[in-house]
Image (cartoon, rainbow, N blue to C red):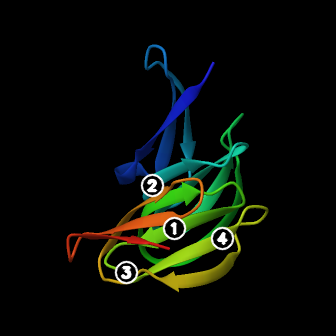
């Protein structure tokens, strides 16, 4: 059965919920205020205030973290890498799956990066400061 995750920004935790009825299956401390979540097919990624981390889905153990500047607003998995945007930023950052290492940043083409999506080929990013969407 598939389970959902919920970020709890105020207490630096994520909740694991059963999708069928919303029952809480676990509460896991992440060490920073979490905001964004994404699943890479194996592990759960959490982005938040000043950090991005990777949690083991079975027990919520933090496997790796990396520091970032600002609040991670959105994460997206492209089948190979994890992508992230920070609030009010102008770049989209790429991270290595194995250890959450920053790989490279790409200019989003605008300011106020907010949300990410992967369409099977491209990464899309919303730019809330200019009411636009950019395709990488």
Identify the element where label 3 is drawn: loop
Vertical position of residue 94 compared to residue 19: above or below:
below
Disc 4, disc 2: CB below 8 Å? no
Q: Which residue is mark 3?
A: 89
Q: Which residue is mark 1?
A: 84
Residue 125, image quadrant: bottom left
In whole angstroms, how far apart are the C-alphas of marks 3 and 4? Answer: 16 Å
Q: Quick check: 88 left or right of 96? A: left
In whole angstroms, how far apart are the C-alphas of marks 1 and 3? Answer: 11 Å
Q: Residues within 10 Å of mark 4 (few under 14, many from 20)?
A: many
Q: Quick check: 77 left or right of 34? A: right
Disc 2, disc 1: CB below 8 Å? yes
Disc 1, disc 4: CB below 8 Å? yes
Q: Residue at x 65, y 41 (%)?
A: 60
Vertical position of residue 39 compared to residue 118: above or below:
above
Q: Residues within 10 Å of mark 1 (few under 14, many from 20)?
A: many
Q: Which of marks 2 and 4 precedes in the sequence? A: 2
Q: Residues within 10 Å of mark 2 (few under 14, many from 20)?
A: many
Identify the element where label 4 is drawn: strand
Q: Which residue is mark 4?
A: 95
- Using the image, tell me which numbered label, if any, was put on residue 36: 2
In whole angstroms, how far apart are the C-alphas of marks 1 and 4? Answer: 8 Å
């Amino acid at each position: 059965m598939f389970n959902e995750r919920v970020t709890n920004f105020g207490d630096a935790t994520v909740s694991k919920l059963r999708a069928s009825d919303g029952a809480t299956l676990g509460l896991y401390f992440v060490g920073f205020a979490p905001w964004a979540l994404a699943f890479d097919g194996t592990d759960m990624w959490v982005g938040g205030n000043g950090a991005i981390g990777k949690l083991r889905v079975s027990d919520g153990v933090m496997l790796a973290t990396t520091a970032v500047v600002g609040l991670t607003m959105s994460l997206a998995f492209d089948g190979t890498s994890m992508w992230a945007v920070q609030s009010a930023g102008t770049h989209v950052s790429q991270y290595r799956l194995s250890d959450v290492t920053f790989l490279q940043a790409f200019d989003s083409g605008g300011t106020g990066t907010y949300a990410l999506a992967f369409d099977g080929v491209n990464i899309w990013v919303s730019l809330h400061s200019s009411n636009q969407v950019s395709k990488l």
